Image (cartoon, helix red, strand yellow):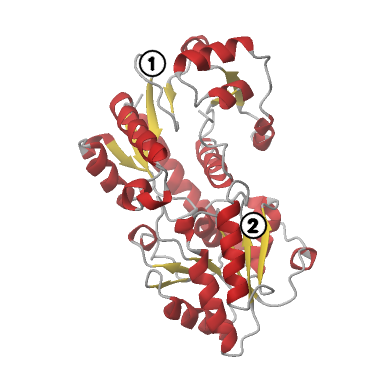
Amino acid sequence: MADGYIDEHGTLDYLKIILRGLYLRPDTHVTMFFPSENERRFRHYPPFFRSLYGLISPYQRNNAIEDFSEFKELSIIEYRRSNLKALIQKNGINVIFPCMMDLGKGMPVKWAVEFFDFQHKYYPQYFSLRTRIGRSIYFNSAAKHADMIFVNSQDAKKDVCKFCHIDDSKVEVLPFCASLGYDKIGDDLTGIPEKYGITKPYFLISNQFYSHKRHDVAFRALKEVREKGNDVCIVCTGSMVNVPKLIASLKQLCQELNIENEVIFLGVIPKKEQIELMKNAISVIQPSEFEGDCSGQIIDAITIGQRVIASDIDVIKEVSFYDHISFFKLNNVNELAEIMMEYVKTPHNRPSYDELIKKEQAYSKAFSDALYGLISKLV
């Protein structure tokens, strides 16, 4: 079920990782149920009105289908909620995995739902009352209806059991996988920093712009780093749509810190170019105060052998096995600045292409085995 995964770049990338894991086994047939544009547009309406609008509105193809062109064997079926059960039966589907929506009662096959995080419980100030209520209703309803719940970290599993009041036997952990696809590891592009006007050494933050991502902590640390004589900057990628107040406040902070010319906001850029910027950075910075997993940019950094500086929250510390990650105390500007300055002084040589390929193959094989292990529990 593509719905829920195709709305943000991070979840879209993760769905592709799952597909790569599935296709590591020969003779695998995967059918992706893709919401029509009508289904996406009206999905937040009450059921009756959603069905009514879906019936009377003209059909529109979902252009996000093009994002899956690398999967030549993938069968894609566009659906509306009203005909989903019939399509499942007609196409001989054995199990639904993954899914990020509540399919409700009476599905003809077993299904697993993925839960992202319970941030609204820990940081309610970042969410409207309506959103907090909506998320709680969704999680509890999906937990009741699904045959399996899966998450990407042990930390998230604890939260599912705690907030949905269910036995941990129904909750599985699908560990992260460092897999970008071999083309993004070996296909070195040239001139990408110059294309975006980056003329000095830089740190990279590839996060969505949400308050809990704490870009402000990194910007304050940059101020300290520059005051110590280090002529470096921070480059930020990630969608800036729908968050004008946050973007404005971050830019205002940069002006107050006198680093407005040393923080570069790029918005969304092509994935290959983002990875190329990551390869050429001093390191990646992940200052977030909450994540449901170790975060997409850290997974990307591990895949290409780049260094990471991250906040010491429990979920990110689950990747402490990685040799090139350093942790700073959450929201501690001074600690972050010290690590940044140490990284400036000590250039990093990323592993060779052959080494990266070997490691990614190992990561992908382990992920694929774990993936099929979960599916076998549903079939």
Q: Which residue is mark 2?
A: 185
Q: Residue 339, relative to residue 299: is it above or below?
A: below
Q: Tag 2, which secondary structure? A: helix
Which of the 4 image quadrants contains residue 266? bottom right
Q: Is 133 or 75 nearer to us in this picture?
A: 133
Helix, strand or loop at label 1? It is loop
Q: Residues within 10 Å of mark 1 (few under 14, many from 20)?
A: some
Q: Nearer the viewer, residue 188 or 151?
A: 151
Q: Quadrant of the C terminus?
A: top left
Q: Is residue 175 left or right of residue 157?
A: right
Q: Residue at x 39, y 65 (%)?
A: 321
Identify the image quadrant of residue 374.
top left
Q: Which of the two residues, 147 or 166, is positioned nearer the viewer here?
A: 166
Disc 1 marks a residue whose amino acid type is Met
Asked if residue 178 lies left or right of residue 130, the reply is: right
- Check disc 2: other Cα within 10 Å, few if <14, some if 14-19, many if 20+: many
> Mark 1 vs mark 2: which is more N-terminal?
1
Q: Is the Cβ of the residue at disc 1 closer than 8 Å to that at disc 2? A: no
Q: Which residue is mark 1?
A: 107
